[in-house]
Image (tube, rainbow, N blue to C red):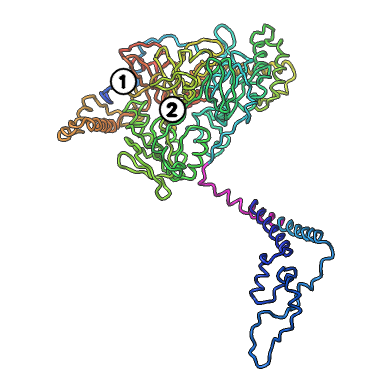
Amino acid sequence: MYRIFKIVNGITYTTHRNVDLLHLEGWYRLTTAQRYFSKKGGKTPQNANSKECSADAGDFCKRPPVDCNPPGQKRLPVFSECPAPNAMDQLPKPQCPYKEYDAQQKKSYFKVLIVGAIVFLVSVAAVIKSQSPSKKDKPKNKRRIKQVMKLPPKSSEIPPAVPYLLIGGGTASFSAFRAIKSAEPEAKILVISNENNFPHMRPPLSKELWFSPDDSAVKDLKFKQWNGTERSLYYEPDDFYESCKHLMQNPKGGVAVAKGWVVTHIDVTGKRAFLDDGYAVCYDKCLIATGSSPKNLDIFEKASPALKERITLFREIFDFQDLHDIVRNSESIAIIGGGFLGSELACALARKGKDAGLQMTQIFKESGNMGKILPEYLSLWTTEQVIKEGVNVVRHAEVTGIKLDNKKVQINLSNGQSVSVDHIVVAIGVTPNTSLAEKSELEVDPELGGYLVNTELQARSDLYIAGDCSCFYDTKLGRRRVEHHDHAVVSGRLAGENMAGANKPYWHQSMFWSDLGPDLGYEAIGIVDSSLPTVGIFAKATPKDNPQAVVSATDEGIRSTTEELVSEECDTHIRGDPEQRKFLEKVKREQQSAGNKGDDYGKGVIFYLRDDVVVGILLWNVFNRMNVARQVLKDERKYDDLNEVAKLFNIHQEE
Amino acid sequence: MSYCRKLGPNEKDLVIFATKEDHEVPSSITLPEPDPQPGLILPNGNINWNCPCLGGMATGPCGIEFRNAFSCFHYSKEEPKGTDCFELFKTMQTCMQQYPTLYNKDLGDDDELNEALDERKNTMAELKNTMDESKNTTDEFKITSDNKEKKT
């Protein structure tokens, strides 16, 4: 539109200029028309006022007339011709003063202009309208653009002093404000969140939200629970929250959320938190629950913008919606990472894209899915289940390079393979958000990461930390930092209770769960780390379940097959290179495990031991036994026969 | 017959396949008493306002009105129970009507005291049921317990 006006203005300008030019004096200002006629030889529309002409005019007229055609002579071109009457002079002269005449002219020009502009606008509008439907079809390949809006837009609407300040708007923060409000009904709580959304849960983003048959979940963010009822991702509806502006005026108190705002640092002794525009909020009690951010690979971080368009770091509602669009428009997707998020997403996407023929690839460096959590044999078995879900699993592989190749992204791997996909999802873990630490003079654990806090989740006087970014002291299991939903719930609640004056220690162990497809689910509690020695007790399959399983294997039988796997000749080579030996041993074990087809790790309980004491318990496809697991952990005992303990879990019971 | 084998790096992982018959023999282990899982009513008879079974009822914009009404009912010595709490329930309802998206139940209909109390009683019963359920599950928000009970 702007361009159109510019052109129109240009036209009016030159028309006015032309009018003026006609009345300009001086030879040097020849109009185009004049130049044209002068070249043609003569019949110039005479400018009667021209200086040159007027100076000679008298003499010229007094000269004797030139004989234009002397007899017997060849007609020669004559320099000065007899003046021909100028047609322009015969034009009726304006009767009014020039300015009025000009104004009149301008008026008419203006009218024409207006009419022209209207016609132009109407036609442009018509063109835009007729083209818009085709535009709607187009953004297939355009990704959503993430925008964080500040709400309230001005910090002056945020109260300058609040009794309770919660930094971060995730699960830990939600759990904390619920605990504070329960203990102190009239509490006034301000949540400062750097997100666009009100507090919500994240686990369904990689599970249930993908299972709904239609795409309604993308918009309304509702998912089906196990019992068939629907629920929203949001903990509370929007109306639950008070506005930031009115929080301090409400005698009943309330919870207000300032969205899109970032806290840059805290003056811990002065009990003030500073927002990104420098505004300070004073508090009586403060909680930091800033959570964590997804990690990325250096290779991806340094990639070109065109490649980065093809890479997703998965964490938020936005990422879910974005990835949902991508899945619909992709033929192949690769997931980097073999942990919780990577494995869950691989299974969920494989299922989602099954009918559309989506090719899912999962790439990770461990030997099996959940390799850092599950003991090796179980991890390998899980990978088999993931493959059954339709995922192409590439193990022992790291990304060494990526490039755009014929509209696809080619991923080169450390094992020499390369995979071509439309899109990449990076799920290689998270780092706690501790950017506040340095300027606020708070201590961060050098090994585990996260703000260091005591058993009451307290970093300093009136300052508490909960959730992913909290490195706390567990009186039973030592210093820990846990990145799970239930831990955010448990630690957020504890912090909230303590902020309201409970002074409780961390005592209630959090748990976690994961689902890989509909037939595989597990829950765990305590320290569940695959590097610890484990004892797993599984329900032996009955002939009905799996005929092969009843072929009983003995320890002896397995050893003999193990020895066969590496021949003597190979062994001498292997011995020379410890790295290679290690790797071959790993592969050997895998072959061995894969060879035991009769083993069905369908249901069971796995104990994780540290100095022979049970520090973690994983319930494999066994549900509703978490209470028993809690009791076993609480016992902190060395058991001679864990099979006896396993009996308490009733693993043979039909679920 | 159950059998056992050693697997993994340094054979650190022990795997036991246990038969049903083997596990039918009662365990020789006795565990310590489970931690009390506070439900809606604490062992001392007080109300646990942080019970997940209450959802956002006690913490939302009508939380104070809800607490007043529910406390009155819980500690009521009248016969039938709660007949002395009519005014408090009415205040709660007036508040809830302002937030239809939060309290979507049709609260405007029951003007009669008995009706109101009957509804509350039902709510109490529901709450108690939820409480019992939540006692069985260890974790707090529905999302967690959903997964736990999904396979049952």
- Residue A229 seen in the figure: no
Residue A443 % position (x, y): 44, 18
**Which is more toward the observer, A467 or A43?**
A43
Residue A429 % position (x, y): 42, 30
Q: Which residue corresponds to the image point at 73% horizontal and 61% vertical from the top-left?
A: A20
**Where does label 2 land, which residue?**
A431
Characterize the local packing of mark 1: few (<14), some (14-19) or many (20 or more) Cα atoms within 10 angstroms.
Answer: many
Instruction: Work out whether A334 lies above or below A480.
Output: below
Q: CA distance from mark 1 to mark 2?
A: 27 Å
1 or 2: mark nearer the eye: 2
Q: Amino acid at mark 2?
A: Thr
* Chain letter belonging to callout 1: A
Q: Give the extent of the magenta segment.
A: A118-143
* Chain letter belonging to callout 2: A
Where on the picture, by quarter, is residue B15?
A: top left
Q: Number of marks in the image?
A: 2
- Residue A293 seen in the figure: yes
**Where does label 1 land, which residue?**
A533
